[in-house]
Amino acid sequence: MTEEVKAATEVVMGTQFWIATAIFVLVYGLIIADKIHKTILAIVGAASMIILRIVTQEDAFHSMELGIDWNVIFLLVSMMIIINIMRPTGVFEYIAIKSAKVAKGRPFAIMAIFSVVTAVVSAFLDNVTTVLLIAPVTLLICQALDLDVVPFLITEAIASNIGGTATLIGDPPNIMIASKAQLDFMAFVYNLTPVIIVVLIAYVITIKFIFGKRLTVKEELRQRVMAMNENEAIKDPLLLKKCLAVLAITVTGFIFHGMLHYEPATIALAGAGLLLLVSGTKEPHHILAECEWATLFFFMGLFMIVGGVVNVGLIKWMAIKVLDITQGSLLGTSTVILWFSAFASAFIDNIPYVATMNPLVIDMAKQLWPGVTGIDLLHHPDLMPIWWSLALGACLGGNGTMIGASANVVVCGMAEKMGKPISFKQFMLYGMPLMIESVIICHVYIWLRYYVLKI
Amino acid sequence: MKAKDLMIPVQDYLKPDDTLRDAVNLLKVAQRGEERVGVKGLPVLDEAGKLVGMLSIRDILKSVHPTYMDLMNLGEFTWDGMLEETAKKIADKKVYTLMTKDVITVKEDSSLMDAVDHLIKRNVKRLPVIDKTGKVIGMLYERDVFFAIVKAMLNENTGGGK
């Protein structure tokens, strides 16, 4: 404790501290208020941090600790490029139609298979992309079967958030944590994939209880689904073959990147470059223009804003407070981080949340093990469960409400366009219990694996 | 020649609260000049006669086309009867929910080239013509602009400037 008290006094709460804190609080507050687009807020906030000399432009643009994490940006943009090239091949339509036919047009089977497919695809692609690919087909199938589409859309959004948690590349919080904590793809596979498989199985069983009996379709309508020929979806078989080959190479690259000492962004960039090359496209500007630049600039802005509050010591001060609350107990800290992250991410965007929590966890580690630095600190055996708790809480927490994750926002937007708006309460009625169920499973997993069995 | 010289005065129009069923009925029989031929688009005027939108055949096509089909290529997976089913479902929707609200207009004194500029750049087939107070006084159709061009090419008497 004396260590911590001494460290606490090191945070100088001068003018700089309060200016940076004010920018940070204002930007996050306005993001939550949702009146001005979050990307604009992030850019204005970042510029303010530099203009008001909280961080230098040099640090904001080039420092890993205080500025833009290019590992995250290039990983995201590269995956977006790969998807943009793949989309017109029709492979995603093929997968979805095929899934509906495998389910033989039976409604719960469709719901379960779509959920599992969404989860698996989400583990490798961005969650929003995944739901944007599966939801239109879901809407078509539901119209064909004369089913209420709302339960299907909600279950898919939740499944995509669950699946995204499983790997390094599945969800932005994981990408950010991996970069900051220098964790590789296989570390996520070893530590998160097993519990996510359990969460997914529990999820499918739970939705069976909720929706299983409620969903019925007329026999003749099922014929509409069975009459669909999924092979017609494939528009460009040659390009599809190229895409699948490059994707296979890229995923192999992810599996071995730690061993080969390459950053994940390097692998993704190589994959994107290779696919651009072999696709034979003459118009790279179309493919690049379709990348979600608003999201990418949101990330860049946030990194600079968080860099500002790291620089003035706000994050360190917060880290000390967290340790005060948990009395330095590691099990206590990871439990608090798991549950706090889940509820925080249910109501605020998990991207700014994790952008803030990453340096906080590192500051906390510095307080706990003052003599340790670098990779030894980041990968301190006692720190690892805290990283996993942060990842699980922040990713799965998004399921709590319709604003908790971008995938939820997207499906709710689609439902509204189709004239079937989903209310905040309606989403939460399903999302919150399912989120709590998944976090309980994770809680038991973390306690059992890291504190009892210690494996 | 100016827009007002080529326009056809407004005879038929829709109200925002009309249903699509009313709208298609009127589209079917609306007058164009002297003849009752049906038109491909009608202005939507509020009670004060102010232009609030346009409803065209294209808007009707869009209204039966599910929004999710914009997002992906799903045309091959639709079924016989889907269009008719959807049409029945949306018949009672109000015109204001489906009309094009961002309407491109021309002033009565605008030149025909100005009208062509709008027709091309905004990819529309007809333009409401408004007077100085902003009231719609007529419709300028792509086809009639084309006939003005034909006339100019074949008969030198109708050249520009009076």
Image (spheres, coloured by chain):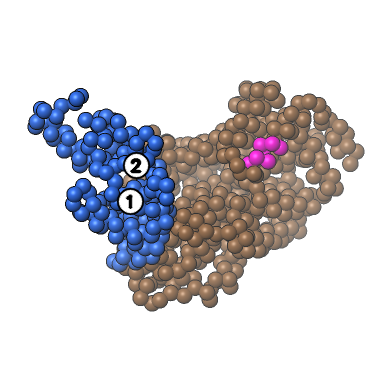
Viewport quadrant of the N terminus of chain A? top right
Q: Residues within 10 Å of mark 1 (few under 14, many from 20)?
A: many
Kindly identify the amino acid type of the residue bearing the numbered disc 2.
Val
Is any part of residue A171 visible from this angle? yes
Point out the stretch of residues depicted in magenta.
Answer: A25-31
Residue at 46% across, 39% down: A291
Please state if B80 lies on the left or on the right of A364 as rendered: left
Point out residue A85 in the picture as x, y percentages from the top left corner: 39, 43
Q: Earlier in the sequence, mark 1 or mark 2?
A: 1
Please state if A398 lies on the left or on the right of A118 as rendered: right
Point out residue B129 in the picture as x, y percentages from the top left corner: 31, 38
Does the magenta-highlighted stretch encompass residue A29? Answer: yes
Is any part of residue A116 visible from this angle? no
Supply the letter of whichever chain is blue: B
Between A365 and A102, the one nearer to me in the picture: A102
Does the magenta-highlighted stretch encompass residue B100? Answer: no
Tell me the CA gap for discs 1 and 2: 10 Å
Q: Give the residue number, with chain letter if any, for mark 2.
A: B136
Between B122 and B65, the one nearer to me in the picture: B122
Please state if B156 lies on the left or on the right of A414 as rendered: left
Chain A appears in which tint? brown
Q: Give the residue number, with chain letter if any, for mark 1.
A: B13
